[in-house]
Image: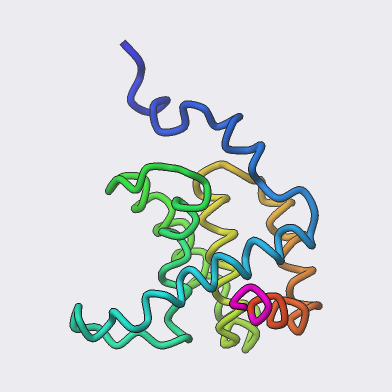
Amino acid sequence: MENPENALFRGVEDLRTGIPKSKLEWIAEIAEAYRDAEEAIPFGPITGQLIEEKDLFHLAPAVCLKFRGIKSTKRNLKKATDGALSSYVASKDLVGPILDDSHVSFAFCYLASHFALDLVDEMEINDIMEYIEGHRKELAEAILKSGK
């Protein structure tokens, strides 16, 4: 019988093949993921939640699971969410106001979710985030473009 711990990532090699390979591919995917998360905004009042653009980073772990084709089980969502939000809280005071940018905070949590799920390593995440911090305008333009 298969160890339940292994069942979570059965086929991770297959999942990794869909992982962006360049910074520009990451920007494009994050833009598409952001637009996907934005689709939840109109449904906020139905659920009794006011969802604003600044809140979208909370949805990044769920979008990560969706985009990677990982089942959105309680366990998977908890692992991705715990990793993303704990990293966000730990980093918020260290990095200053950059995480106040809704695009950057979403990108951060989207990438941190990938790290929490062992889909990318810390060095790769740091490299991509450093690029995003220096190219915020490029990310914003990609988000606008992906909505057309």
Q: Which residue is drawn at 46% across and 26% down?
A: 10
Residue 147: say if magenta: yes
Residue 32 image-quadrant placement? bottom right
Residue 58 image-quadrant placement? bottom left
Residue 32 vs residue 57, the one in the foreground: 32
Q: Would you place residue 102 above or below residue 124 in this image? A: below
Q: Where is residue 8 in the image (x, y as percent from the top left)?
A: 40, 33
Residue 138 image-quadrant placement? bottom right
Q: Where is residue 104 in the image (x, y as percent from the top left)?
A: 62, 77
Q: How would you classify the magenta stretch by its main secondary structure?
A: helix
Question: Can you see residue 94?
Answer: no
Q: Where is residue 124 in the image (x, y as percent from the top left)?
A: 73, 52
Please name the colour scheme applied to the rendered image. Answer: rainbow
Q: Which residue is drawn at 47% across and 65% down?
A: 60
Which range of residues does the magenta coloring cover?
Answer: 144-148
In the rendered image, which quarter contains the N terminus?
top left
Residue 8: say if magenta: no
Q: Residue at x 42, y 81 (%)?
A: 55
